[in-house]
Image (cartoon, grey):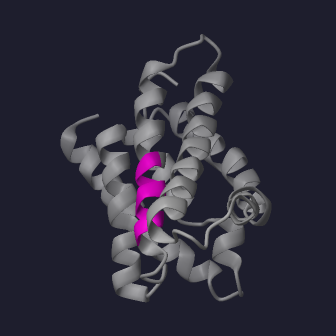
Amino acid sequence: MTKTKNLTISAMFVALCIVLPMAFHSVANAGQVFLPMHIPVLLCGMICGWPYGLACGVLGPLLSSLMTGMPPMAILPGMMFELAAYGFVTGLLSRKINTGNKILDLYIPLVCAMLLGRLLLGILNALIFRAGSYTLDIWLTAAFVTSLPGTIIQLIIVPAIVFMLRKARLITYPV
């Protein structure tokens, strides 16, 4: 893909980072449960590559917070790091991993990004953003229990969209 096409697609994913959470936040705690902002960032990394995924992971939550107040400023820094890690890792690993199995080549980057992003968020919360009040139990609950529906949605939707785009020949990188 050309740089212009990657920039255009990335801008669309940043816009989705603003619009999707608005739809979910009409229900209490739906953002924490369904993780709507994560999907565009994961897709951006996989489709456009790590620089674009990283930028989407930073700009999506920042612009959403400035325009809609979601995520709140207290949560914004950690979320920016988490989503930047998602975009970076999916973008990097989706180009590096080639097992010969299309499903594994999609799921390995996706799962690695989801785990590393959550781990980074937990470490940053424990050491910087919520130092002294952030425990392992809080992290495990937020990262794996409360967000389980969103995680399942990501594991279904992201590969399905990438497969559809490949089948339609709209993206051609090796996945």
The answer to which quarter of the image holds residue 50 is top left
The part of the image, by quadrant, that contains residue 107 is top right
Residue at position x 36%, y 85% in the image: 67
Q: Residue at x 34, y 75 (%)?
A: 63
Location of residue 88 with respect to 25 vertically, above or below: above
Above/below status of 1 relative to 71 = above
Q: Main secondary structure of the magenta part?
A: helix
Judge whether residue 12 can be spotted in this image: no
Question: Does the rendering let one see residue 74?
Answer: yes
Instruction: Give the answer, above or below, for where 31 lies relative to 81.
Output: below
Q: Quadrant of residue 122?
A: bottom right
Depth check: give the residue in front, 118 or 111. 118
Residue 161 position, x and y percent, is 59, 45
Give the camera-side residue of 41 and 116. Answer: 116
In the picture, measured across the screen, residue 1 lies left or right of residue 87, that is: left
Taking 103 as reference, is 116 left or right?
A: left
Instruction: Say how many tags the image has.
Output: 0
Q: Residue 28, image x and y in percent?
A: 71, 87
Work out which residue is located at the far top of the displayed protein and give it.
100
Name the residue: 70% across, 45% down: 155
> What segment carries the magenta color?
77-85
Q: In the rendered structure, does residue 81 fall within the stretch colored magenta?
A: yes
In this view of the protein, which residue sits in the foreground, 135 or 169?
135
Verify whether residue 143 appears in magenta: no
- Among all residues in the image, which is located at the extreme left? 4
Q: Position of residue 83 (x, y in %)?
A: 46, 56
Residue at x 20%, y 40% (from the top left corner): 3
Residue 29 % position (x, y):
70, 81
Quarter of the figure that contains the N terminus = top left
